[in-house]
Amino acid sequence: MNSNTLPIPEYSAQVADSAAFLDKSLAITLPALFAKQVQLRPLAPAVVWAGGALTYADLDARSTAVARNLRDAGLASGDPAVLFFESSAEFLV
């Protein structure tokens, strides 16, 4: 078994925890769902491609860095932004 995967009982328990989280939230957002996965499964693969993978913790760190750079450039929450990237894993973050 891969060190980033969980046995079925533990994974099932985390899915149930996530479902309970969803049931308690009326205004669930994608960032909240992502944050919950980072909390529950930081070492689990979030993005997998032929050349590698990013864990939820890696993806969280990279996306936080992108958000910080956008804020530092003067963008505020809710401001539209257009980003151009080459097709790669880095495109995701």
Image (spheres, helix red, strand yellow):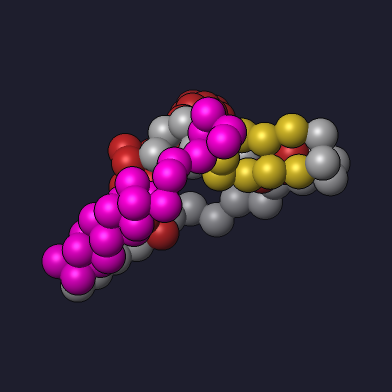
Please provide percent x and percent y for residue 3: 53, 29
Q: Is the magenta stretch mostly helix, strand or loop?
A: helix
Camera-nearest residue between 4 and 69: 4
Camera-nearest residue between 3 and 73: 3
Please provide percent x and percent y for residue 22: 25, 66
Quadrant location of residue 84?
top right
Quadrant location of residue 40?
top left
In which quadrant is the N terminus drawn? top right
User: Residue at image x 41%, y 59%?
Assistant: 30
Camera-nearest residue between 63 and 25: 25
Question: Is residue 5 a member of the stretch shown in magenta?
Answer: yes
Locate residue 59 relative to residue 77 in the image: left or right: right
User: Residue at image x 20%, y 63%?
Assistant: 20
Q: Which residue lies furthest to the left in this view?
A: 24
Q: State the extent of the magenta-drawn residues as a range.
A: 1-25
Camera-nearest residue between 75 and 85: 85
User: Residue at image x 34%, y 57%?
Assistant: 12
User: Residue at image x 62%, y 39%?
Assistant: 93
Please provide percent x and percent y for residue 34: 41, 49
